[in-house]
Image (cartoon, grey):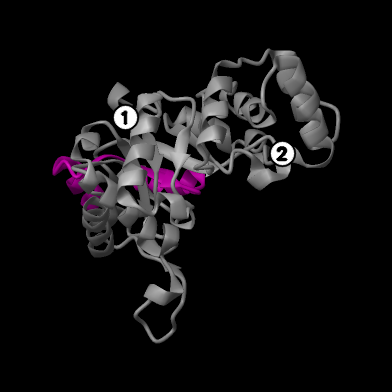
């Protein structure tokens, strides 16, 4: 992956809950918030067309329109292929996946317009589609890269044979894979999945890197709090440091939009865990000794 498309930050800012923050509903205030993050060196913003039923992309785009100078500084990830029931025009009103060329071309153009950017740095297929026509979809995605609409194609929540089937049909390499990984959900490290991501050269991105709050609960939460005192770190910062210690240095996609939380995580981002501490935390997470 080119340096331009690498996740060269301690974490990626997830925009899934942007529509739930009334203080950021005003375009000028959101532009201020985005500019503050950029000034901190946090340049990656993670979207999906279904976030807020497309509201999150729209709000972000309004901020870009209010302050166009930010467009050259932001790096945007977005995802598509999930069709929510309310947007299914069939008589079934069923949630489904659509990786057809026509649908993806429409969503790429719509995201560019909604987000108010010149290019989608990473465009990810949000879920594996059992009806995927790999060659037709690959041709459409390659064409979008060739046209400069997207910088790289990636996937989210795909299994190895699913992303390999798509990759085999594409001219351009897949760039990134976004999947669930946290200290509370470390299973992919032991079933071969994470090794396949790294072996195939995909940049790993961890969604729900704090396990949806599970890392703060019960035995694991107590252990993290204890270790955090030792390292003079927040518990969340320690949990993200545990992730970044992995080969490939997965980029955590954090969900908080609160400035104080983001700044605390940024302060803790220089924390580097030694091997013994990493495994001690893993023991607490799995509630059994390393075999």
- Residue beneath the point at 20% across and 47% down: 144
- Residue beneath the point at 37% across and 60% down: 55
Which part of the image, by quadrant, shows the N terminus?
A: top left
Q: Position of residue 230 (x, y in %)?
A: 76, 16
User: Helix, strand, or loop for circle 2?
Assistant: helix
Q: CA distance from mark 1 to mark 2?
A: 30 Å
> Which dot marks residue 5?
1
User: Helix, strand, or loop for circle 1?
Assistant: helix
For label 2, the residue is: 215
Q: Is residue 150 magenta?
A: yes
- Residue beneath the point at 56% across and 24% down: 244
Which part of the image, by quadrant, shows the C terminus?
A: top right
Q: Nearer the viewer, residue 135 or 177?
A: 177
Vertically, is 93 above or below 171? below
The residue stretch that appears in magenta: 139-166
Q: Is residue 180 magenta?
A: no
Query: How dense is the environment of label 1, judged by Cα within 10 Å: few (below 14), some, or many (20 and up)?
Result: some
């Amino acid at each position: 992956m080119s340096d331009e498309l690498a996740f060269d930050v301690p974490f990626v800012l997830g925009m899934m809950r942007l529509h739930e923050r009334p203080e950021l509903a005003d375009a000028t205030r959101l532009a201020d918030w985005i500019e503050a993050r950029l000034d901190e060196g946090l340049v990656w913003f993670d979207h999906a067309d279904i976030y807020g039923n497309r509201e999150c992309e729209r709000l972000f785009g309004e901020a870009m329109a209010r302050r166009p100078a930010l467009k050259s500084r932001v790096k945007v990830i977005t995802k598509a292929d999930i069709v929510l029931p309310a947007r299914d025009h069939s008589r079934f009103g069923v949630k489904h996946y659509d990786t057809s060329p026509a649908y993806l071309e429409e969503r790429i153009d719509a995201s560019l317009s909604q987000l108010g950017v010149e290019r989608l740095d990473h465009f990810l297929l949000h879920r594996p589609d059992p009806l995927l026509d790999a060659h037709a979809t690959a041709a459409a995605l390659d064409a979008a890269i060739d046209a400069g609409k997207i910088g790289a194609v990636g996937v989210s929540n795909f299994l190895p044979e699913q992303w390999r089937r798509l990759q085999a049909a594409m001219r351009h390499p897949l760039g990134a894979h976004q999947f669930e990984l946290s200290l509370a959900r470390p299973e992919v490290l032991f079933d071969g999945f994470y090794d396949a991501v790294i072996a195939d050269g995909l940049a790993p991105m961890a969604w729900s890197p704090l396990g949806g709050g599970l890392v703060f609960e019960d035995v694991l939460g107590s252990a993290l709090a204890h270790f955090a005192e030792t390292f003079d770190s927040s518990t969340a910062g320690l949990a993200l440091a545990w992730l970044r210690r992995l080969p490939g240095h997965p980029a955590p996609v954090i969900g908080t939009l609160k400035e104080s939380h983001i700044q605390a995580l940024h302060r803790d981002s220089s924390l580097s865990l030694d091997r013994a501490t990493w495994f001690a935390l893993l023991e607490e997470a799995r509630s059994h000794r390393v075999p």
